[in-house]
Image (spheres, rainbow, N blue to C red):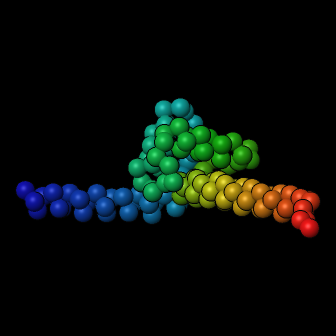
Amino acid sequence: MCHALFMKNVFNKIKRLYKQLAGRLPSPLPVGINEFNAWCDDIKATYDLPTQSDDDIRFTCAAVIMRFNEIADAKPKYFFVRAMRSGAAKQIAGYAFGEVKNRQQAAYKAAQEAANVPQTSEA
């Protein structure tokens, strides 16, 4: 029983690796909604994505496809994985950028207020 489970696990890992390699080759883009949903599900099952939300994956894939020119009819699935990872990295970088900017503005404002405070002298 344990051996069968081990072999099934190994087989699933080999199958996923094969799908990852095949995903680097161009494949036709989906043309029907059922085909699109199955295609997105396959990307989700094959790759480690920054999100596991079906809506996020579908939205990103649809947005990337919408940006293709009129003659693009095939792209590697890995192209979409890279777009998702890039988008996630940009979101995090934007958030980090905003945090640093807010801290710098708060420090600048505190310095301005400290400079404008009249000093009281006791004689």
Q: What residue appears at the point 60 percent right and 54 percent down from the top-left corner?
A: 88
Q: Residue furthest left?
A: 1
Image side of residue 119 versus residue 24, left or right: right
Q: What residue appears at the point 78 percent right and 62 percent down from the top-left corner?
A: 107
Image side of residue 19 versus residue 55, left or right: left
Image side of residue 62 versus residue 34, left or right: right
Q: Which of the image's four quarters has the N terminus?
A: bottom left
Q: Position of residue 105 (x, y in %)?
A: 80, 58
Q: Foreground: 3 or 112? A: 112
Q: What residue appears at the point 55 percent right and 42 percent down from the top-left corner?
A: 56
Q: Residue furthest front?
A: 123
Tell me where residue 94 sits by quadrant.
bottom right
Residue 23 in sight from this viewpoint: yes
Tell me where residue 104 sits by quadrant.
bottom right
Q: Position of residue 67 (x, y in %)?
A: 72, 46
Q: Foreground: 99 or 22? A: 99
Q: Position of residue 30 (x, y in %)?
A: 55, 40
Q: Position of residue 120 (x, y in %)?
A: 90, 62
Q: Which of the image's four quarters has the C terminus?
A: bottom right
